[in-house]
Amino acid sequence: MSIGILAFLSLLPILAVALFLVVLRWPASKAMPISYIVAVLLALFVWQVPGAQVAAATVNGLVVTITLLYIIFGAILVLNTLQESGGLKTIRQGFTDITPDRRVQVIIIAWLFGSFIEGSAGFGSPAAVAVPLLVGLGFPALAAVMAGMIIQSTPVSFGAVGTPMIVGVGTGLGSTESVKTFAANLGYADWAQFIAMIAAKVALLHMIAGTLIPLFVVALMTKFYGKNKTFREGMKMWKFALFASFSMTIPYIIVANLLGPEFPSMLGGLIGLAIVVSAAKKGFLMPAKEDCWDFAPKEQWDPEWSGKIEIQDISGAKGEISMLKAWAPYVLVGLFLVLSRLEFLPFASLLKSWTLSIPNIFGTKITASFQPLFSPGTIFILVSLITYFMHQMTPSSYKRAWKNSGKTMIAASTALVFTVPMVQVFINSAGGAAGYDQMPIALAEGVAALAGSAWPIFAPFIGGLGAFVAGSNTVSNMMFSLFQFGVGERIAVDPTWIVALQAVGGAAGNMICVHNVVAASAVVGLVGKEGYVIRQTLLPFTYYALLLGSVGYSIVWTAQKGFFNIGTIIALIIAAAAIYIISTNQKQLNSMYPNKNISS
């Protein structure tokens, strides 16, 4: 079978998702079973994979689903515990005291706090923490999910203490001696230093594209969820958005070059949080009181914006909750996640020591495993229990938090039960009687055959495709890093830059990943609107992948083709468009308010 036909067939499960979920707007609970069936039929009858392997991949997918639902339950439980104790009311008041402006709040919580949580835990934790916190502050659930997904880009490559780079790229490239020889010839006898060198390139690329991510968040929020449905109200915050962006990305790139891939997102988010919150309290780049932006009254919202979790001002504690006590659960979540994931501390190995596994399912090489103690879900539950005692809650209010959390988690299970097994069948499709590579590789090879020397522009999209399907930058990097390295060698450019483009594309792919959207939506009781969210995040994903693909093309081909090559031209067009939009917006605001200085 030709490469083109095989690539097209490999694309069918993804096309099914695009058609039913995004175009026809079916809920994931209805669209994903069709995608799963398509993947199974292709695996059995085209790739001729043994039925036992397809069944094993499905079982593995169900185990992964259980691990995701466990995390979702824990995240919801922390939110409901805070709501029942009255701590959420205190947190909301604290943000209102800084500023009632929702644009500032979403940048601080989603971009900065979310980056810190991504750096410490990864694997969807930012959405599980930041999204319900935004809803608790009074954001529409759909707006909170959109914001939580868009920031799943810049910090992701260094999430979970560098796992996508160390495990994803490191494992993906480390399986071949020729790559290790290549590294040694460059002077990197230490494999970790070679991965750190690639990580530094990844950080540089992320800093370039990540500059506009906070602005994307606020502009899309005001466009889709504002009273006036306009980008202008979000674009008005461009100075503050850029300030918040650089407050995170400058420390981020410094840490990537000095300390390696473990800490850029964690320290970048934490340093940025300290800088921006301190500046916001002092009024730096803050909108005037009369210019503060808020959503319309809740009764005017589209009913589809709200999830099943209703945030109410309840006080199930015996006394008033101070700001320190209210924030303590989230501080503990961050602290426990960091302590449990630093390999030089004893906690990680201790928590990983208990592993529930099903080895060699149905006689195949596929093994399913779950590490309950190491899961963020356990940390969430532990923090919820600590909060019960710390906030001196009544037993009845805490029981209600558990009951409501269970109901919300169950609502998410239907979509994930088909989404994750589809992914596992798609990935585990190698080794069939037909002799074809696994579906993701067959698809990538088809694109590479068409792209030729233009491959750097497409490389981030392949990384994004891997994350879209697998729901993980780490898995995307494991699948495609060696392939991307090989394509770089074939077109005679520095292959480490192509691997870096894979990594940044894989990070950006989290914005549009189905099961990440399902998981984030489930945390706030919003089920069935996954396609709506993906349609909103497609624009920032396309911007991210196209800009960095163009920058990558310019970097690897400038020596041979000159600086003004197609990559440079596309990147300059994107930059010029951003500057034009911002400046035009500023002129329109100045014309609307001729006697007023619009400083933010």
Image: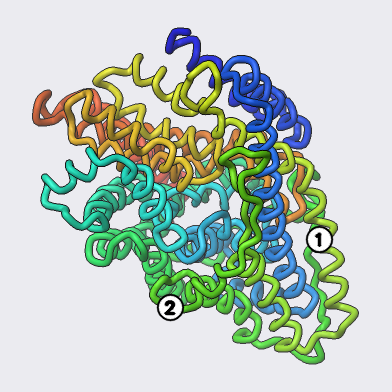
Relative to residue 313, is residue 517 depicted above or below? above
Quick one: SS at disc 2? loop
Which amino acid type is marked by label 2? Answer: Leu
Query: Can residue 10 be seen here?
Result: yes
Left or right of 84? Residue 460 is left
Relative to residue 122, is residue 331 depicted above or below? below
Residue 155: percent from left, percent from top: 42, 55
Left or right of 542? Residue 369 is right
Label located before the other in sequence (1 or 2): 1
Q: CA distance from mark 1 to mark 2?
A: 40 Å
Relative to residue 10, is residue 281 depicted above or below? below
Return the residue at label 2: 345
Query: Can residue 292 be seen here?
Result: no
The crowding category of the residue bearing disc 2, from other C-alpha atoms within 10 Å (few below 14, some 14 to 19, many at least 20), is few
Identify the colour scheme used.
rainbow
Q: Nearer the viewer, residue 121 or 372?
A: 372
The picture quadrant where one finds residue 376 is bottom right
Q: Is mark 1 in CB contact (under 8 Å) with mark 2?
A: no
The picture quadrant where one finds residue 31 is top right
Quadrant location of the C terminus in the rendered image: bottom left
Hey, which residue is sitting farthest front in the picture? 363
Which amino acid type is marked by label 1? Answer: Glu
Residue 10: percent from left, percent from top: 54, 21
Q: Residue at x 42, y 76 (%)?
A: 278
Residue 280: percent from left, percent from top: 45, 71
Q: Residue at x 72, y 37 (%)?
A: 418
The picture quadrant where one finds residue 40 is top right
Return the residue at label 1: 310
Hey, which residue is sitting farthest bottom in the picture? 319
Q: Nearer the viewer, residue 109 or 340?
A: 340
Quick one: SS at disc 1? loop
Callout in the foreground (1, 2)? 2
